[in-house]
Image (tube, helix red, strand yellow):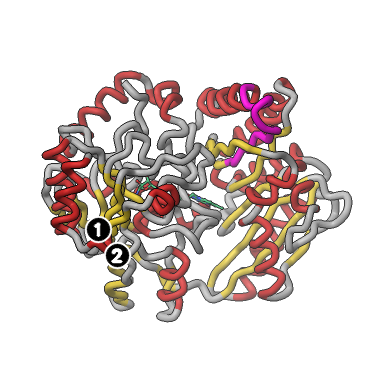
Amino acid sequence: MDAAAGELRAAFPAGRLVFESERLAEYGKDESDLGTFPPGVVVQVDSAEEVRTIFAIASRHRVPVVPIAARSGKSGGSLAIHGGIGVSVERMNRILDIRPGDLTAQVQPGVITGAFQAEVEKHGLFYPPDPNSLDLCSIGGNVAENAGGPRALKYGVTREYVLGLEVVVPTGEVLRLGRQTIKGVAGYDLTALFVGSEGTLGIVTEVTLKLLPRPRHVATALVCFPDVDTAARAVSRVLAEGVIPRCLELIDDVSVQAIARGSPFQLPVGAGAALLFETDGNDEEQVFAEMARVAGMVQGSASGEVIVAQNEAQRRDIWETRKYLSVALKTLAAAKLSEDVAVPRSRIPEMVARCREIGRAHGLLVATYGHAGDGNLHCNVLFDGDRERPAADAAVAEVLRAAVDLGGTITGEHGVGLAKRDFLEYEQGAEVIALERRVKAVFDPLGILNPGKMFPES
Ligand SMILES: Cc1cc2nc3c(=O)[nH]c(=O)nc-3n(C[C@H](O)[C@H](O)[C@H](O)COP(=O)(O)OP(=O)(O)OC[C@H]3O[C@@H](n4cnc5c(N)ncnc54)[C@H](O)[C@@H]3O)c2cc1C
């Protein structure tokens, strides 16, 4: 590492190298609660060419390279578990081009997702992927994790919007993958391979994104239920009726307790669970008619209250409450482990029930909320520190296996990273993992890029 650091000092201005331990510790953390794993040095890069220089140095000295963006990740993907060189793309934060005529945009990877959305909206355009961390996370991190969000139900996840990528691979090539057009089928779809590859195949230095015209009207409503089982069954019913709202979010009874402790929007007394949903479109009457239809479908089992957001402030309060639920849950217990399984939509009621039973068996509370409309549930195992940690770990393992047993996946959007690498085989099997390792070796024959992530450590 010392020799590599020496070469980095010669190749980069001192102001773009971080060696101080306090600052390195910041780069060594994300939102996964897995601990602090600082790299030996961080380089704040400005271009693909600079990333190429870093790979050359790292290859010569067999030093790990870890891509780091906004560090909002929840699976530990950006943690430098084997030290090495952290490549921070924070300075590559420019929107290069927005082309309303083509409905596309070109951005650097460090652009903050929410800032990009706000910018395209000024042109009457719409970038739908909306992770709840959108004010923190970056487009590059979203591409690496194939991030989703509430609107994925109607509009899909990041993958659906990535047309092309510029990527630097550890062997030194700067690859321009994909296309600038909406359609195009030439060659293997390597763009899709890189989306969701969790920073294990290459470092993304530019992204071409698809945009949509912005829907002119959005209606937001909350429906309260006596209990979570009734709410979960209502999700399945709405989707089975052939209605796809723009989002359909589940809030369970434990989450309701957390909200009661001071979230911006307060649910009516007696609510045991809730569904938050939105409809959108260009015709205001139609948007509200669709909202009434969804409300009608679920109301049969609702505890009576359908709350329609009356203005932008109320809508914002409802969404702030939902967005920061994971933070609010920390008022109920000293610690939590947060999983983001996904199951086929018809199995949502079963998955919710299994999470509760698993918690009960281990004497722990499990809060289940999330993007239930697309089957993606955030199961949060709450516990009180070191004494309960083994029980919490056991509960998490059971939650992940239950999702796979119900035909689902261990991660709907947060990625495998470090957090779930030991469970990938349960979902995919040894043969598929062996093939994936061979694919990685094509781009990264020395195994220097983000080692120890996604696959079980061999
Ligand atoms: C409160 C909260 C809410 C969240 N809600 C959602 C949600 O609704 N949906 C969702 O999908 N996620 C959500 N997340 C998780 C997180 O925000 C996403 O995974 C996000 O995509 C991470 O982006 P980032 O810029 O912070 O990346 P980081 O955390 O810095 O990195 C994530 C991964 O991407 C890799 N990486 C970063 N940049 C590059 C690059 N340029 N090239 C190659 N690899 C790279 C890193 O090595 C790492 O493996 C939430 C997180 C929080 C804290």
User: In what element is the residue under mark 1?
Assistant: strand
For the C terminus, the image quarter is top left
- Count of numbered badges drawn on the protein: 2
Q: Position of residue 161 (x, y in %)?
A: 35, 58
Q: To which residue does mark 2 refer?
A: 92
How crowded pointer 2 is (Cα within 10 Å; few <14, some 14-19, many 20+) is rated as many
Q: Residue 51 got which mark?
A: none
Bounds of the magenta segment: 377-390
Mark 2 lies within 8 Å of ligand 1 (Cβ measured): yes
Which of the two discs, 1 and 2, labels the residue nearer the N terminus? Answer: 2
- Amino acid type at circle 1 is Thr
Who's the residue at 26% across and 54% down the image? 204
Task: Give the residue type at disc 2.
Answer: Met
For the question of whether residue 301 can be seen, the reply is no
**Mark 1 beta carbon near ligand 1 (under 8 Å):** yes
Cβ atoms under marks 1 and 2 closer than 8 Å: yes
Could you give the CA–CA distance between mark 1 and mark 2, rounded to whole angstroms?
8 Å
The residue lying toward the viewer, choosing from 278 and 134, is 134
> Which x, y percent locates residue 211?
37, 67
Up/down of 129 relative to 442, above or below: below
Q: Which residue is mark 1?
A: 205
